[in-house]
Image (cartoon, rainbow, N blue to C red):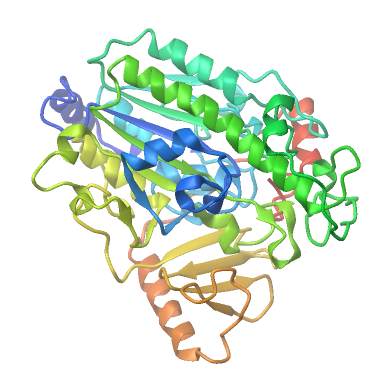
């Protein structure tokens, strides 16, 4: 809710934005997010297979941030942090997908809505469905005039409703068809497809299926953990070796890419793209065998789960200006995070809003001395995990284990723990993290756990979304 803003501020916002795009960098903001999408599984991020031709074309006309980080390896906490510009602990987003933000937490959609700009969201993951009305205005749907969570399909091994990329894109294009080309809006589209079990259409899979090779089989899990096993919900057709699952994951990404391409084409045809700020990212990644975690997420805060793709397509007027964002760079190596989305939207739409974490991507550069943390589990839980990176060094505090330190410059796979060799780096990261978190003294908000209908509860339980213990997807 916008209780944090006074009625006077709300009135001034409405007055200032009667023509929201008259003197602002962007007329509209379009946020596209994809579930469970590793950064290194896309062509523009170095993947050798042709999985993402449409996103690759988008990246070629945009700015790619090579060092971008989510706040959590779970959908609910990650996307809540993205929309609210603060970390999951601070806004009560977590420790699991069962826990949602309360009414008192302010989202960027609410700020935009109060400015008189239309807001709409189309989501495809069952954990993002609107909570029952009886729970009040809680969850990530806050601030959206139109929140489309119409899901009517199920995948193998999952009882949770979802929506595939083709159906989601159809719904978005229908909504866009009711808008005029000069109408400002804030649009969020969340796709689900790369999330397991990996079940792409047969014709898509045929393009990515490779001949079998000799590989050691993995055990079929009796639980949804992916540690040393294939999670129960991921087991497909008795397949026990990694390659078939990796092929299916790539095919799922390609199917999503095909339909996000339709969305981008629809925006171009409606003349809604060139004056828009468009942001593409993922909520989190997926483990494909790293640290013996297979086809899973939500169990650790390792790099493959929380480093995410980030593409920002600036409005044409900004790209062509004498002082373009990021000095016109096509690739940015500086450290950024999802919490930077809030100030970017505020600047792009010329809004007044409370100061929040992060730095706008419309600037000339990103700060050099920053750190980005990632969180999993509640502060009180013994299995709590935390990671902090400054872009090169990365410290991982996993459950009750001693700190692990990795040099991302020389060890991209984060296999070699250097904590014993570099205690000075550990101390420096700890001090910088402490200063960073103390820079926002606002009290933390409590999370809300909605009372869900029995079918949704069964679906969440099937995926490990039970007691907020960090196990989830």
Residue 239 in percent (x, y) is at 87, 44
Observer able to see residue 447 = no
* Residue drawn at point x = 40 percent, y = 21 percent: 265
Q: Which part of the image, by quadrant, shows the N terminus?
A: top left
Image quadrant in which you'd find residue 258: top right
* Residue drawn at point x = 25 percent, y = 53 percent: 329
Image quadrant in which you'd find residue 272: top left
Residue 428 in percent (x, y) is at 41, 82
Residue 202 in percent (x, y) is at 74, 26
Q: Which part of the image, by quadrant, shows the C terminus?
A: top right
Nearer the observer, 59 or 300: 59
Tell me if 225 is positioned left or right of 69 in this view: right
Q: Is residue 465 above or below residue 268?
A: below
Residue at the top extreme, as displayed: 178
Nearer the observer, 454 or 122: 122
Label count reads 0
Residue 75 in percent (x, y) is at 58, 43
Nearer the observer, 340 or 412: 412
Image quadrant in which you'd find residue 331: bottom left
């Amino acid at each position: 809710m916008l209780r944090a803003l006074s009625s006077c501020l709300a009135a001034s916002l409405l007055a200032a934005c009667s023509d929201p795009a008259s003197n602002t960098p962007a007329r509209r903001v379009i946020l596209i997010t994809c579930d469970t999408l590793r950064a290194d599984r896309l062509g523009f991020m170095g993947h050798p297979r042709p999985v993402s031709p449409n996103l690759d074309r988008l990246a070629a006309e945009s700015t790619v941030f090579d060092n971008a980080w989510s706040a959590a390896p779970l959908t609910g906490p990650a996307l809540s942090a993205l929309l609210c510009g603060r970390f999951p602990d601070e806004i009560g987003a977590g420790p699991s997908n069962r826990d949602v933000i309360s009414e008192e937490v302010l989202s960027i959609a609410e700020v935009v809505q109060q400015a008189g700009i239309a807001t709409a969201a189309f989501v495809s993951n069952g954990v993002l469905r609107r909570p029952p009305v009886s729970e009040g205005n809680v969850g990530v749907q806050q601030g959206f005039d139109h929140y489309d969570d119409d899901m009517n399909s199920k995948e193998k091994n999952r009882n949770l409703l979802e929506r595939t990329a083709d159906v989601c894109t159809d719904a978005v294009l229908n909504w866009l068809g009711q808008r005029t080309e000069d109408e400002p809006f804030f649009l969020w589209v969340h796709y689900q497809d790369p999330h397991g079990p990996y079940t792409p259409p047969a014709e898509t899979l045929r393009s990515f299926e490779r001949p079998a090779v000799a590989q050691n089989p993995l055990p079929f899990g009796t639980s949804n953990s992916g540690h040393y096993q294939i999670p129960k919900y991921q087991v497909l057709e008795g397949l026990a070796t990694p390659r078939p699952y990796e092929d299916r994951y790539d095919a799922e990404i390609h199917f999503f890419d095909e339909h996000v391409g339709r969305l981008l084409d629809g925006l171009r045809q409606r003349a809604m793209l060139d004056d828009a700020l468009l942001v593409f990212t993922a909520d989190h990644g997926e483990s494909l065998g790293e640290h013996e975690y297979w086809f899973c997420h939500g169990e650790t805060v390792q790099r493959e789960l929380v480093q995410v793709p980030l593409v920002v397509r600036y409005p044409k007027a900004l790209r062509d200006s004498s002082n373009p964002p990021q000095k016109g760079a096509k690739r940015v190596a500086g450290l950024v995070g999802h919490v930077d989305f809030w100030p970017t939207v505020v600047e792009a739409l010329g809004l007044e809003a409370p100061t929040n974490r992060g730095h706008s991507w419309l600037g000339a550069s990103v700060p050099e001395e920053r750190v980005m943390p990632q969180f999993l589990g509640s502060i009180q839980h013994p299995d709590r995990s935390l990671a902090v990176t400054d872009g090169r060094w990365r410290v991982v505090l996993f459950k009750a284990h001693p700190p692990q330190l990795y040099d991302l410059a020389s060890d991209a796979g984060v296999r070699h723990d250097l904590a014993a060799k570099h205690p000075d780096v550990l101390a420096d990261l700890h001090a910088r993290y402490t200063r960073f978190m103390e820079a926002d003294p606002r009290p933390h908000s409590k999370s809300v756990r909605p009372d869900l209908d029995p079918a949704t509860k069964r679906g969440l339980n099937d995926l490990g979304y039970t007691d907020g213990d960090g196990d989830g997807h």
